Image (cartoon, grey):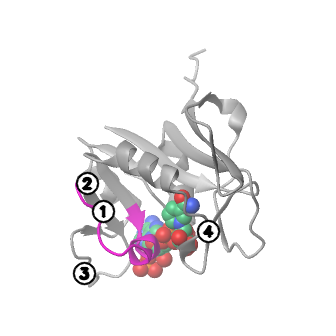
Amino acid sequence: MEIAIIAAVGKNMELGRNNDLIWHFKEDMKFFRETTTGNTVVMGRKTFESLPHALPNRRNIVITSNKNYAAEGAEVVGSVEEAVAKTKNDNVFVIGGGKVYAEFLSCADKLYLTEIDAVCDGADVFFPKFDKSRYIAEKLTDFFADGIHFSHILYTKKAVKNR
Ligand SMILES: NC(=O)c1ccc[n+]([C@@H]2O[C@H](COP(=O)([O-])OP(=O)(O)OC[C@H]3O[C@@H](n4cnc5c(N)ncnc54)[C@H](OP(=O)(O)O)[C@@H]3O)[C@@H](O)[C@H]2O)c1
């Protein structure tokens, strides 16, 4: 099993506003679809509710504390531990939002970040702070759309050396 995080962030690590995405670039949607298709996506209840429906061609897992929660097209779990246990043979992409990224940051070996060269003053959800010096960064793409630059960067956690 491998756990990766995939997220799109602004210059201030903004993720969302009013339970929706801030930016909608078709090149980024394509990257997200191609990277996650065929794999398992894990998300928080709020992110699931921000989507029109469960993501097709992927195993969808939704985390919530509501034991009666029903999510069409998705499996519902009550904790991070349950999500990890249920997906131990899968390639997992954690797809948000801010709360769930923070909970998975320590166990994700890879972060696929769309780094958008723009800011959003009204953002209300942010990506958790992380120490970039602990990762190897590889730029995968470079785009310019709607007057904004953005790139896909793959951060891979450096191996911890044994003493
Ligand atoms: N830019 C991006 O790449 C990106 C990606 C995804 C989402 N977003 C944005 O992020 C925002 C949503 O993020 P968010 O942080 O508000 O919410 P979220 O992480 O999507 O969902 C939070 C909810 O998940 C459940 N949850 C999380 N951890 C749990 C745990 N350990 N045990 C039980 N339940 C748990 C809880 O649901 P209950 O309250 O039901 O218990 C919690 O209220 C939206 O604006 C969305 O558009 C952005």
Badge 4 marks a residue whose secondary structure is: loop
Kindly identify which numbered label has been placed on residue 43.
none
83 horizontally vs 115: left or right: left
Within 10 Å of the Cα at label 4, are there few (<14), some (14-19), or many (20+) other Cα atoms?
A: some
Quadrant in which residue 60 is drawn: bottom left
Could you tell me which residue is drawn at 58 percent across and 45 percent down? 113
Q: Which residue is mark 2?
A: 58
**Dot 4 beta carbon under 8 Å from ligand 1:** yes
Looking at the rendered structure, the secondary structure element under dot 2 is: loop
Q: Is residue 143 left or right of residue 83?
A: right
Q: Mark 2 against mark 3, which lies toward the viewer?
A: 2
Circle 3 sits on which residue? 70
Identify the mark nearer the N-term, 2 or 3.
2
- Magenta residues, start to end: 43-58
- Determine whether label 2 and label 1 are within 8 Å by CB: yes
The response on whether ligand 1 sits within 8 Å of label 2 is no
Image position of 114 (left or right of 132): left
Q: Which tag, 2 or 4, sits closer to the chain's start?
A: 4
- Callout 1 amino acid: Leu
Whether residues under marks 2 and 3 lie with C-beta atoms below 8 angstroms apart, the answer is no
The residue that disc 4 covers is 22
Where is 148 relative to 98, above or below?
Answer: above
